[in-house]
Image: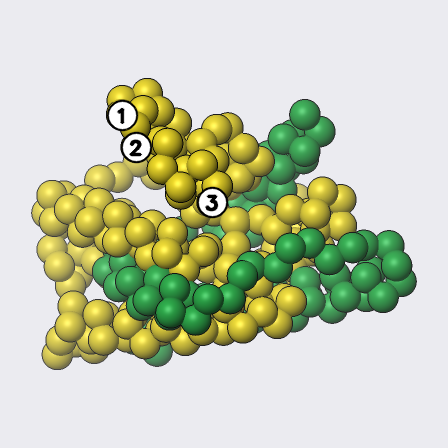
Chain colours: A yellow, B green
Amino acid sequence: MLKLLRQKEWSPYLAGTLLGLVYVISIAVTGIIPGASGAFENIGGLIAQAVYPDLAKNTYFQFVMPPGITTAVMILLGIVIGAFVSAKLSGDFKLQTVSDPQWKRVFGNATWKRWLVLFIGGIILEFGAGIAGGCTSGLAIGGGLFLAPSAFIFIAAMFASGIPVAMLMYWRKY
Amino acid sequence: MFEMLFSLVVGFTFGFALQKAGLSKYHKIVNVFRFTDLAVLKFMMTTLAVSMVGVFALNSLGIVALPNIPATYVIGNLIGGLIFGVGMAGAGF
């Protein structure tokens, strides 16, 4: 068991089974569908309340995503801690400004380039998740398991735009 | 209070599974859009299958009530998904 926990990489089927059980237990015990992106909106609402209270009074923050330290924020916090513990156990944890070998090979070692793309990509991603009503975890899996049409529209759309973007970024190396 | 602590544990296992599947790495995410490494899809679809069977089995036994499922509004889901895909393939998370 300990050996398994210390393994660097699991088969995606094993890790997927573990996450599937997490969804079942979470829905069974609290009725909460785990998701990652909602937490950013809850925290964003808190920041809006502090620096620009008028913005926090709009319909979105009043009814769709109320600001506050919600269960979604706790899940996000847990994700960070869980991933850290997993990486520490397997010795996979390193502090680096550009961490990915494939990125270095294709786009070079420049830190600013990676961080700029991460920052802008993060904004785009969260903005899209806000419009769609969830991200890969909360909408694609959390909705897909109930066969909600929204989840499958979302997955199709995500690949419909993700594939051309990857093609453009990799160009001849695609 | 219980819900908050419980969610922390849910998140912990969530993050643990993601890291073990290697999905915290840039190349795993972007390569699914290049069709060179389908780990993201294998992981997602396994999660879907397991949670689907589990939730509906417990629901049929009358143990678990179904929560509010994510709303469908075609234009929003579609446009949101299109924007999301750009960020996901670009940044790789």
Q: Residue at x 54, y 33 (%)?
A: A70
Q: Quadrant of the C terminus of chain A?
A: bottom left
Q: Residue at x 39, y 27 (%)?
A: A46
> Do the residues under discs 1 and 2 have CB atoms within 8 angstroms?
yes
Task: Give the residue pinned by disc 2.
Answer: A55
Front-lying residue, A144 or B28:
A144
Q: Is residue A127 above or below residue B46?
A: above
Amino acid under disc 1: Tyr
- Characterize the local packing of mark 2: few (<14), some (14-19) or many (20 or more) Cα atoms within 10 angstroms: few
Question: Could you tell whether A105 is left or right of A140 in the image?
Answer: left
Amino acid under disc 2: Leu
**Residue A52 shows which numbered tag?**
1
The spot of residue A126 in percent (x, y) is: 34, 50
Same chain under badges 1 and 3? The reply is yes
Chain of the residue under label 1: A
Question: Could you tell whether B3 is left or right of B80 in the image?
Answer: right
Front-lying residue, A18 or B62:
B62
Amino acid under disc 3: Val
**Residue A64 shows which numbered tag?**
3
Q: Earlier in the sequence, mark 1 or mark 3?
A: 1
Q: Is residue A143 above or below residue A122?
A: below
Residue A71 visible to an observer of this rendering: yes
Chain of the residue under label 3: A
Q: Secondary structure at mark 3?
A: helix
The spot of residue A19 in percent (x, y) is: 61, 55
Q: Residue at x 43, y 71 (%)?
A: B74
